[in-house]
Image (cartoon, rainbow, N blue to C red):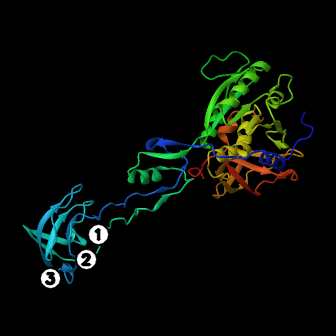
């Protein structure tokens, strides 16, 4: 079945030739629910931020020129003629020789052009002594100095994080136009797979893949739609796949793609529409039996049942497509250089991805130590591995202490 395996690059080219991502449309999101969404339009400010000149210190609003020449021995003496509190419109003008008490964030009253800090003054009833000269606009945040009316503050395609949400709130917005999140159908196959939460019969295992892959879909900017566990039955699998295709923008299955007598997934997927299967096995380890199809313009990834294989192939091939559908930049996996902790062998004729965990040795060198799994399906490999080292098809091994490039599964900054 897998006699003519594609190289990894051939698989990538086959996907690229079929996948023509187009915008999935946009929708309006409530601001408090817009975190991590992709902005669908430029945002132009309709007002100045701040909308008024305001004090950045507690002190006194004054005319700066009234303080020129002031020092400890000869302070400038001004008359306090009022108070401005935060959140209120000033009802006093500052004339020559006058000062107005003001708090941080309060509007600058008419006639004043600076704020002298309270620490640099001494007050006796309505008489204020200023011991330090100040310059015009000192301790004042001018109207529009942060954002000017008509300024484009956020660009289409930006991902909305906490800072961007804060900017939108500063503009008085409660809703924002965002790109629609791609819906990704996720289902598991196999007579041995049971959904978590149910009793575990003898000979069964809980569904690992749907949960790890669904989480990876969310990390990639998509929304997973869990279709549950489908038994190794042609009719049931065909029905589930038909429903998944009409319900989602992409379908990801796991299991049922190898050479077993009940591995029906590839033939059923291929029968769902044209062009059908474009990748039928890849010369990689782990992940060789991966099948990739396109039904119309919708990708269908049929991943191996082994958890490590499934998640690795997802990161390498499916994740970039979800990012494109979501309108996100396709981010390359983060990498870090380390020394191989021991010799790593490749599989003959196949690009090999060796799972590694990172640690420092006694000399403070970063070491990439292979994760001993015993098999590509070992569950703990997922938790132990920080990333992987890629060994090309034409290399037999990576030697101990050789510098390697580690592709990171997650942010391990706190660890390394």
The picture places residue 246, in percent across and down from the top left corner, at 68, 30
Camera-side residue: 88 or 1? 88
The image quarter containing residue 200 is top right
For the view shown, which residue lies furthest in the left direction?
125
At x 49%, y 45%, the residue is 35
The image quarter containing residue 134 is bottom left
> CA separation, marks 2 and 1?
9 Å
Left or right: residue 37 versus residue 364 is left
The picture places residue 172, in percent across and down from the top left corner, at 38, 50
Q: Nearer the viewer, mark 1 or mark 3?
A: 1
Badge 1: residue crowd in 10 Å (few <14, some 14–19, many ≥20): many
**261 lies above or below 277:** above
At x 60%, y 43%, the residue is 25
At x 75%, y 33%, the residue is 306
The image quarter containing residue 248 is top right
The picture places residue 24, in percent across and down from the top left corner, at 62, 42
Badge 1 is on which residue?
Answer: 139
Badge 2 is on which residue?
Answer: 134
> CA separation, marks 3 and 2?
15 Å
Badge 3 is on which residue?
Answer: 74
The picture places residue 278, in percent across and down from the top left corner, at 83, 40
Q: Of marks 3 and 2, which one's residue comes earlier in the chain?
A: 3
Asked whether disc 2 touches disc 1, contact meaning CB atoms under 8 Å apart, the reply is: yes
Camera-side residue: 211 or 61? 61
Badge 3: residue crowd in 10 Å (few <14, some 14–19, many ≥20): few
């Amino acid at each position: 079945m897998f006699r003519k395996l594609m190289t990894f690059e051939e698989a990538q080219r086959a996907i690229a030739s079929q996948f023509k991502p187009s915008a999935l449309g946009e929708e309006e999101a409530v601001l408090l629910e817009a975190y991590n969404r992709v902005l669908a339009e430029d945002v132009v400010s309709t007002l100045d931020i701040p909308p008024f000149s305001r004090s950045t210190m507690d002190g006194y609003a004054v005319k700066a020129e009234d303080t020129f020449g002031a020092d400890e021995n000869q302070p400038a003496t001004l008359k306090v003629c009022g108070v401005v509190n935060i959140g209120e419109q000033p009802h006093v003008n500052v004339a020559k020789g006058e000062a107005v008490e003001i708090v941080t964030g309060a509007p600058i009253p008419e006639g004043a052009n600076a704020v002298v800090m309270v620490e640099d003054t001494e007050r006796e009833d309505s008489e204020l002594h200023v011991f330090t000269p100040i310059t015009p606009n000192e301790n004042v945040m001018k109207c529009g100095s942060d954002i000017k009316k008509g300024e484009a503050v956020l660009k289409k395609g930006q991902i909305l994080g906490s800072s961007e949400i804060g900017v939108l709130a500063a503009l008085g917005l409660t809703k924002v136009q965002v790109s629609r999140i791609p819906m990704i159908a996720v289902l598991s196959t196999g007579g041995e797979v049971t959904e978590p939460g149910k009793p575990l019969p003898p000979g069964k295992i809980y569904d690992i893949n749907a949960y790890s892959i669904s989480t990876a879909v969310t990390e990639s900017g998509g929304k997973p739609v869990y279709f549950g566990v489908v038994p190794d039955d042609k009719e049931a699998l065909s029905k589930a796949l038909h429903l998944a295709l009409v319900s989602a923008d992409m379908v990801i299955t796991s299991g049922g793609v190898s050479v077993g007598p009940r591995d029906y997934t590839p033939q059923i997927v291929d029968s769902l529409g044209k062009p059908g299967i474009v990748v039928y096995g890849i010369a990689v380890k782990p992940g060789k039996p991966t099948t990739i199809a396109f039904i119309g313009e919708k990708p269908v990834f049929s991943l191996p049942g082994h958890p490590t294989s499934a998640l690795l192939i997802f990161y390498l091939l499916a994740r970039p497509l979800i990012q494109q559908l979501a309108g996100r930049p396709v981010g390359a996996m983060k990498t870090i250089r380390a020394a191989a902790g021991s010799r790593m062998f490749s599989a003959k004729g196949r690009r090999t991805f060796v799972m590694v965990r990172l640690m420092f040795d006694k000399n403070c060198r970063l070491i990439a130590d292979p994760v001993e799994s015993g098999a590509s399906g070992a569950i703990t490999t997922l938790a132990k591995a920080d990333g992987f080292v890629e060994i090309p098809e034409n290399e037999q091994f990576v030697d101990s202490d050789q510098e390697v490039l580690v592709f990171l599964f997650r942010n391990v900054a706190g660890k390394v």
